[in-house]
Every structure is written in C-alpha cells, then in structure tokens.
Amino acid sequence: MCTDRSPFERAIPEALLVFVRRRPETNSAGAWSPGPPMTPKAIERRLARADSEEQIAQEKFDAVIVNDDIERAIAELAAIVESRRNGAH
C-alpha cells in the first residue's frame, strides 16, 4: 500500500481498504446496465472516472476484487478479511 495515507487511513489506521473493480466487459459503453438510461457523454465520463478510480485502487488499497462473479468475489473478500484477522498484511 502507498505510504501517502488518506484522512480515513489516518483516522482508522487498522482499516482494511478493499476496492471492488468493475467487470471487464464494462469497459465499453454498451455494457452499462441495468439502471436508468445514460447518455453517451455520461457513459464516457463515467468510464473515464472508473479508469481513474482503478488506478488509485492499485496504488492505495490493500486489495482489489473483480466484480465478475458474485460468489467468487464474496469468497475472495472473506479470505482477505480472514487473512487480516490472522495477522497477515
């Protein structure tokens, strides 16, 4: 994890930061659903923001989980939490 700590990390230094990454197929504008309709410009802005968020996640979070299979993602999160509880960092 990056040594430049956020206000959240300074307030709760023992926090485990886990980023849940979007499914790979949501890298294109046609993959956004369900939800309210989005304009092409809004989708473009959201994808750009998501790319930026993922870069930050790689630098500042303890773990990154891909949200492509809910059962696997839950199991991965549980394993990460259990590992932290057992003292692994």
Image (tube, rainbow, N blue to C red):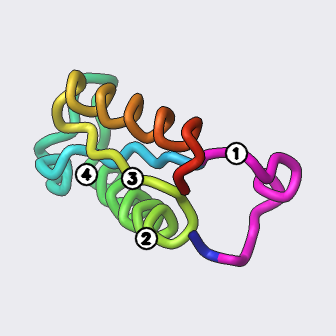
Q: Quick check: 76 above or below 45?
A: above
Kind of residue at disc 4: Pro
Q: Is residue 13 magenta?
A: yes
**Real-space CA distance between mark 3 and mark 4, rounded to the nearest whole angstrom:** 28 Å
Secondary structure under the numbered disc 3 in the rendered image: strand
| x and y percentages locating residue 70 in the rendered image | 24, 25
- Say the numbered circle drawn on residue 40: 4
* Residue position for label 3: 64
**Real-space CA distance between mark 2 and mark 1, rounded to the nearest whole angstrom:** 20 Å
For marks 2 and 1, the one nearer the N-term is 1
- Say the numbered circle drawn on residue 55: 2
| x and y percentages locating residue 1 in the rendered image | 57, 69
For marks 3 and 4, the one nearer the N-term is 4
Per the rendered image, the range of residues in magenta is: 3-16
Kind of residue at disc 3: Val
Q: Identify the residue at the far right of this view.
A: 11
| x and y percentages locating residue 83 in the rendered image | 47, 41
| Majority secondary structure in the magenta region | loop
* Residue position for label 1: 15
Q: Identify the residue at the far front of this view.
A: 86
Q: Quick check: 83 above or below 45?
A: above
Tag 1–tag 3 contact (CB < 8 Å): no
For marks 1 and 4, the one nearer the N-term is 1
**Real-space CA distance between mark 1 and mark 3, rounded to the nearest whole angstrom:** 15 Å
In the image, which is nearer the foreground, mark 3 or mark 4?
3
Tag 2–tag 1 contact (CB < 8 Å): no
- Say the numbered circle drawn on residue 7: none
